[in-house]
């Protein structure tokens, strides 16, 4: 493995450690939402509420906390512009 490849690998590990530490300090609902997004790459708020069995208000709060820590990326849905799609951004 060359030096640039090794440094990229080390950088990725450091980012993973940072994101793990950030998730560790979040409330349980945010951890659950992050775990569900880890397994299902892209979901809407309503899909997250159905999958996690959390109330929609709690899912919104969890997504807000994850967005504050820059752990979730959101974008508008092309099929329904009223909805946002969320993906885990580690």
Image (tube, rainbow, N blue to C red):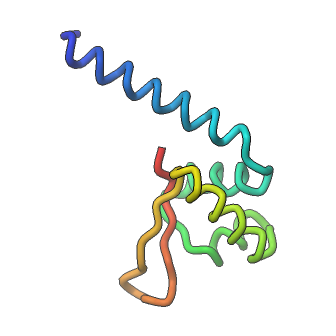
Q: In which quarter of the view is residue 49 placed?
A: bottom right
The x, y position of residue 66, in whole percent, is: 61, 55
In-front residue for pair 61/55: 61
Examine the rendered structure and indicate whether residue 30 appears above or below residue 56: above
The x, y position of residue 40, in whole percent, is: 55, 57
- Residue at (73%, 40%) from the top-left corner? 25
Q: In which quarter of the view is residue 52 placed?
A: bottom right
The x, y position of residue 58, in whole percent, is: 77, 69
- Residue at (40%, 28%) from the top-left corner? 12
Q: In which quarter of the view is residue 57 placed?
A: bottom right
Q: How many marks?
A: 0
- Residue at (39%, 86%) from the top-left corner? 79
The x, y position of residue 13, in whole percent, is: 45, 24
Examine the rendered structure and indicate whether residue 18 appears above or below residue 53: above
Query: Looking at the image, which residue sits at the far front?
Result: 68
Is 23 situated left or right of 87 in this image?
Answer: right
Examine the rendered structure and indicate whether residue 5 appears above or below residue 46: above
In-front residue for pair 35/89: 89
Examine the rendered structure and indicate whether residue 85 appears above or below residue 30: below
The image quadrant where one finds the N terminus is top left
Is 55 situated left or right of 31 in this image?
Answer: right
- Residue at (54%, 68%) from the top-left corner? 43
In-front residue for pair 47/11: 11
């Amino acid at each position: 493995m060359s030096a640039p490849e090794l440094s990229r690998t080390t950088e990725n590990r450091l980012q993973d450690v940072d994101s793990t530490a950030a998730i560790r300090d979040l409330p349980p609902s945010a951890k659950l939402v992050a775990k569900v997004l880890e397994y299902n790459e892209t979901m809407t708020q309503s899909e997250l509420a159905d999958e996690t069995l959390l109330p929609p208000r709690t899912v919104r709060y969890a997504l807000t906390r994850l967005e504050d820590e820059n752990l979730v990326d959101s974008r508008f849905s092309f099929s329904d512009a009223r909805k946002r799609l969320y993906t885990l951004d580690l």
